Image (cartoon, helix red, strand yellow):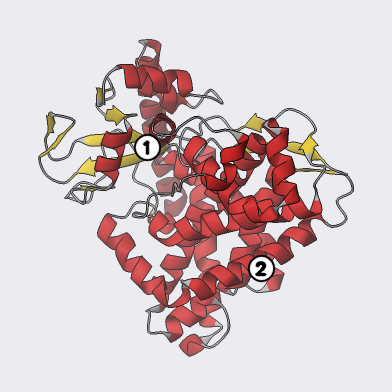
Amino acid sequence: MTDAITTELADRELGRRLHRIRGAHWYFGNHGDPYALILRGQTDDPSVYEERVREGGPLFRSRTGTWVTADPEVAAAVLGDSRFGALDRAGRRPEEYLQPSPATYLGLDRAAYARLRRVAEPVLGADAAAAWRRLGEDVGRRLLAGRGSGLDLTADFARRLPALVLAAWLGVPGERYDEWEESLRAAGPLLDGLLCPQTLAATRAADSAAEGLRALLDEVVAARPGGSGEGAVARMVGAGAAPDDAVAAAVCLALSAVEPTTTLVCEAVRLLLDRPEWWRRLCDSPALAPAAVRHTLRHAPPVRLESRVAHEDVTVAGRPLPAGSHVVVLVGAARRAGAPAAEPADLAGAPAAELPDDLWFALSGEFVGRAAETALGVLAEAAPGLRRDGDIVRWRRSPVLGRYARFPVAYS
C-alpha cells in the first residue's frame, strides 16, 4: 500500500513538472519565440523557426533562458569545446528540463560517456563494423523477404534492422528478441524527452522499457559467468569490465542507436525518392550507400538539436556566457548553412558529416552510420522499384529526432 501511494505521489509530481515545462514552451511560443516553437514539436519541418533563430544572430537568446545557434562556426565551436558538457559542473541538467531516469544512461556527463566508451573499446573497431555489416545484410534481406509488394519502412524495416543487429551482436537470446524489440520501441521517445516533455504515460513507459532492457542484459551477463560466450556484452566482461559497466555500455548503445538509425534510414530514403535519378544511381551502384548517408547527415541529420551546458565562464560569438549557461545547437540548420546546394552528380563526392562524437554518440555514432549504409544497400539491391505508397507521418513532440511514425512504401 505504501509503495502504491509513493508511486502515485511521484507520478503526480512528475506530471506537474511535465505540464509546467510544456506550458512554458507553449507560452513563449505563443509570444513568437522560435526556439520554443521548435520545442513544441508540432511541425514536420521546423526550418521556418530555424531561420528566425538565424536572423537573431550567431547566438540567439530564447525567452526560455537558453542560448540557441544555427551558425555553423558557432555550432562547431560549442560542440568541440571541452568546457561544455551535457550537465553543469554540479552534475545537474538545466532547470527547464527533466533529469532522465538513471536506467536510461542518457543523463550522464562527458567523462562518464568517455568511460563507457573505454569499457566498450574491446568489442568496437573494425571487427565490430564488419560484424554489423554482415548481420545487417542478413537481417535486412530476411525482413524484406516474403513482404509481398509493400511495407511500412519505419516499423517493418528501418527500426527492426538496427534492433535485431544489436540483439545478435550483444548476445541477446533469440527467444527474447520480441521482448527486446518491444522495449526499444517503447523507449523511442527518450532522446526527444531530454528537451521536449513527453506525456506522463509515454515517459513512464519509456523509463520502464529502459529498465527492462537493463534487466534483460543483466540476465545475459548472469548466464555467461566470467565473460564466456560470443556476445559483445560477455566479451566486455571477459576483457575485464565490471558486469554493471558492460550492461550500462550496452544499454546506452542500444538507446542512442536504434531511433537515430531509424530516422536516418527514413530520411535518406525520403531524399533519394524525392530525386528519382539519385535512387536509380544507388540501385545501379549500391556501393554509393555510404555517400547517400553522408549526404543525409549533412542535409537532414537524424539528431536536430544538441544541448550543452557551460562548465565555466566562456565567450561565444563575442558574448560572455557565465558558467551554467545553456546552449542548444540547431544541428540541421547549422549543417545546411555550411553545405553547398547538392546536385545528383555530387552524390558520390558528398562531404563527410558525422554525429557528435562525445556524449552518448561516443558509443553509437559509428554503428548508426554503418547500419544506415547497410540498410540502404539492401533496399537498393532487393527493392529497386521502391516508391512511396501513401503519406509519411511523423511523431509529434519529436524536435530532437523528427521521428517517423509511418512511411508506407511499395516495390516490385
Quadrant in which residue 378 is drawn: bottom right
Marks 1, 2: nearer the viewer: 2
Which quadrant of the rendered structure holds the C terminus?
A: top right
Horizontal placement of 52 versus 324: left or right? right
Label located before the other in sequence (1 or 2) = 1
The residue located at (59%, 57%) in the rendering is 371
Element under label 1?
helix
Residue under label 1, please give it: 13
Q: Return the residue nearer the eye: 366 or 278.
A: 278
Quadrant in which residue 308 is drawn: top left
Residue under label 2, please give it: 135
Q: Amino acid at mark 2?
A: Leu
User: Does the rendering let one see residue 118?
Assistant: yes
**Residue 233 sits above or below residue 406 on the image:** below
All told, the count of numbered labels is 2
User: Does the rendering let one see residue 187?
Assistant: no
Quadrant in which residue 72 is drawn: top left
* Whole-percent x, y for residue 79 in the image: 29, 45
Q: Residues within 10 Å of mark 1 (few under 14, many from 20)?
A: few
Q: Return the residue nearer the eye: 300 or 183.
A: 300
Q: Amino acid at mark 1?
A: Glu
Q: Label for residue 127? A: none
Q: Are marks 1 and 2 in contact (CB under 8 Å)?
A: no
The residue located at (36%, 23%) in the rendering is 35
